[in-house]
Image (cartoon, rainbow, N blue to C red):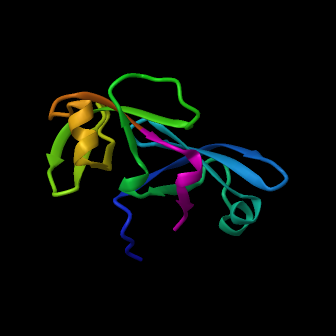
Amino acid sequence: MKISARNQIVGKVVEVKNGPVNSEVVVSTKSGDKIVSVVTLDAMNALDLKVGGEAVCIFKAQSVLLAKADIAVSARNKIKGTVTEIKDGAVNCEVIISTPAGLIVTAIVTEDAKKDLALAKGDSVYAIIKASSILVGVN
């Protein structure tokens, strides 16, 4: 299956916390980064997600917020990386972020946000994604 979400990151499930309605799933990527997702308990059971199993974390580029500093936020996912490419557009731009371990995250932000942050290639940034914005899939 092909999907339109730019960010599709494969890893292993390293932790699962089940609640009465939702479950928190922690996936460790090949690069060593951890991604946290919140899914329904029904989805956990339907996907048969278990510690040690492979999973793919999927999130849209529009769900990624960018910050130039390590700020305190409620979002569970903060991935530190370097801006490796910026593709300008009329209203939005695409920002490609790479971590030292090789993880790549794509963000879509407005041109105004890029200007406000003074984003440029080579800048150190944090990609911030809410756990509820991350879908989990299995093969």
The residue lying at 55 percent from left, 37 percent from top is: 75
Q: Quadrant of residue 53?
A: bottom right
Residue 116 can be seen, yes or no? yes
Q: Residue furthest right?
A: 20
Q: Is residue 52 above or below residue 115?
A: below
Left or right placement of residue 113 versus residue 63 in this view: left
Residue 80, position as x, y percentages in the image: 37, 30
The residue lying at 61 percent from left, 48 percent from top is: 52
The residue lying at 59 percent from left, 33 percent from top is: 74
Observer-nearest residue: 14 or 58? 58
Q: Is residue 130 magenta?
A: yes
Residue 97 can be seen, yes or no? no
Observer-nearest residue: 62 or 97? 62
Q: Quadrant of the N terminus?
A: bottom left
Residue 9, position as x, y percentages in the image: 41, 52
Observer-nearest residue: 116 or 134? 116
Residue 11, position as x, y percentages in the image: 48, 49
Left or right placement of residue 40 versus residue 89 in this view: right
Residue 43, position as x, y percentages in the image: 69, 65
Q: Quadrant of residue 114?
A: top left
Q: Is residue 4 above or below residue 98?
A: below
| Extent of the magenta region | 128-139
